[in-house]
Amino acid sequence: MPTEEPLYWGLTKRSYCTLIHLSQLSSFVLPGLGFILPFILWIAHRDQNENIDQHGRVTANWLLSLLVYSVICFVLTFIIIGAFGFLVLGLMNIIFAIVAAMKANNGELWVYPLSITFFKS
């Protein structure tokens, strides 16, 4: 008898980890949702699966790092370079979320570059 893999909100572990990363892009639908939704997905099942906890941690670290970098860019907008920084951060967030999701779908953990470690693994 094959053992069935547990489901998390109807998704397999790999699909759920992929969703954690891709949920950052939900800010295109509703501003701010891309910051809140990954935390909700992580907190909901972090105690039930180690992989979900690891993917949630790296995503949370990136989002908090992104917040720090955004504050720095905001301050730098007074000397104009901050606007360019916001553009770079936006592109990085999209690219990093897609790369991390693809890695998660393959069962790999990808640590976001330039991410500050707020939550240790």
Image (cartoon, rainbow, N blue to C red):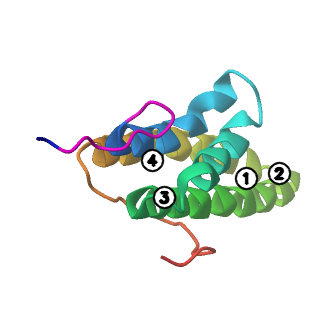
Give the side of residue 101 with respect to residue 108, left or right.
Answer: right
Asked if the residue under mark 2 is in contact with the one under mark 4, i.e. CB atoms within 8 Å, the reply is: no
Task: Locate residue 83 relative to residue 17 in the image: left or right.
Answer: right
The residues bearing labels 4 and 2 have C-alpha atoms spaced at a distance of 24 Å
Q: Name the residue under label 4.
A: 96
56 is within the stretch colored magenta? no
Q: Nearer the viewer, mark 4 or mark 2?
A: 4
In this rendering, does residue 111 appear at all? no
Q: How far apart are marks 4 and 3 (CA)?
A: 26 Å
50 above or below 33?
below
Q: What residue type is labelled 4?
A: Phe
Give the left or right position of residue 100, taking residue 65 as reference: left
**Does label 2 or label 3 sit earlier along the sequence?**
3
User: Does residue 18 appear in this view?
Assistant: yes
Write down the residue under mark 1: 81
Q: Where is residue 30 in the image (x, y as percent from the top left)?
A: 74, 25
| Residue identified by numbered label 2 | 77
Circle 2: residue type = Thr
Q: Which of 73 and 39 is in front in this view?
A: 39
